[in-house]
Image: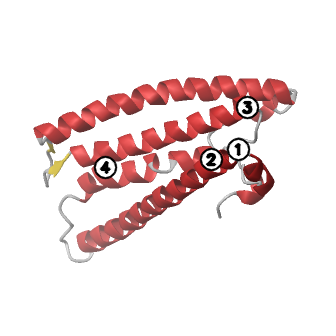
Amino acid sequence: MTNGSQEEQHPGTGAVLSVLRGLDKGFSFLSCLALFVLMLLISVDVTGRYIFNSPIEGVYEIVELYLMPTIVFLGFGLLQRVGGHVRILLIFELLPDKAKRWLDVIFMGSALAVFGVAAVSAGYLAVDHLMAGRMEGGTVPLPLGPSWVVVVLGLGYFCLRLAVQLTLCLLGREYIEPQEARPE
C-alpha cells in the first residue's frame, strides 16, 4: 500500500508502513553489504589460494555463520512487502478477488504461525549460545550467538511484516505493493 490517498485516509497505517519501509531499507542495506563482503572475501581467498598459495583462514566459517544468514534472513521482510515469495499462480489468478483475499489470509496466517514458532525457537537458541559463549569449531573458532541473533532479527521482522499485511488484508486494504512501487 503505497497510495498516498489511502495513507491519508488511515494515518496510523501510513506511519506503520513508513516505519516498516525504513526497516526494509536498513535490512536490505545490511543484506547487500553482506553480499558485497561475501563476494570480496571469496575473491581475495581464491586469489590468495591459487596465485600466492596462501588462502585466508576461516573464510568458509565466516560465510556460513555470518554472511549467508545476513543475506538470506534480512531479506525476508522486503520480499514479503512486494509479494516476491514463491506462489503458484496458475489457478490462483482464475479465482475471484474475494477468494484470493481469503486464501491470502489463510496463507499469511499459516506462515505467521510457522515463522513465529521458528523466530521464538531461534531466539532461545541465540540466547543459549550467547550466554554459554559457544564457538563454532573449524580452522578459526567463531562465536555462534551473533549468527543466531541475525536469524532472529530476520524472522522477527518477517513475522511483523506478515502480521501487518494480514491485518491490512482482513481490513480489505491493499497489502502488497503494486508493481510500479517496487524497489529497484
Q: Which comes before the other along the chain, label 4 or label 3?
A: 4
- Spot occupied by residue 138 in the image (x, y as percentages of width and height): 15, 48
Q: Secondary structure at mark 4?
A: helix
The CA span between labels 1 and 3 is 13 Å
Marks 4/3 in contact by CB < 8 Å: the verdict is no
Q: Amino acid at mark 2?
A: Arg
Q: Which comes before the other along the chain, label 4 or label 2?
A: 4
Q: Amino acid at mark 3?
A: Leu
The CA span between labels 2 and 3 is 17 Å
Q: Which comes before the other along the chain, label 1 or label 2?
A: 2
In this rendering, which labeled residue sits more in front, label 1 or label 4? Answer: 1
Neighbourhood count class around disc 3 (C-alpha, 10 Å): few under 14, some 14–19, many 20 upward: few
- Spot occupied by residue 127 in the image (x, y as percentages of width and height): 22, 36
List the residue tagged with mark 3: 171
The CA span between labels 4 and 3 is 41 Å
Q: Which comes before the other along the chain, label 1 or label 3?
A: 3
Does 151 sit left or right of 87 as displayed? Answer: left
The CA span between labels 1 and 4 is 32 Å
The CA span between labels 1 and 2 is 6 Å
Tally the marks. Answer: 4
The disc at residue 81 is 2
List the residue tagged with mark 1: 176
Q: Amino acid at mark 1?
A: Ile
The disc at residue 64 is 4
Where 72 sits versus 112, above or below? below
Neighbourhood count class around disc 4 (C-alpha, 10 Å): few under 14, some 14–19, many 20 upward: few
* Quarter of the rendering occupied by the C terminus: bottom right
Color encoding of the figure? secondary structure
Outermost residue on the bottom side: it is 52
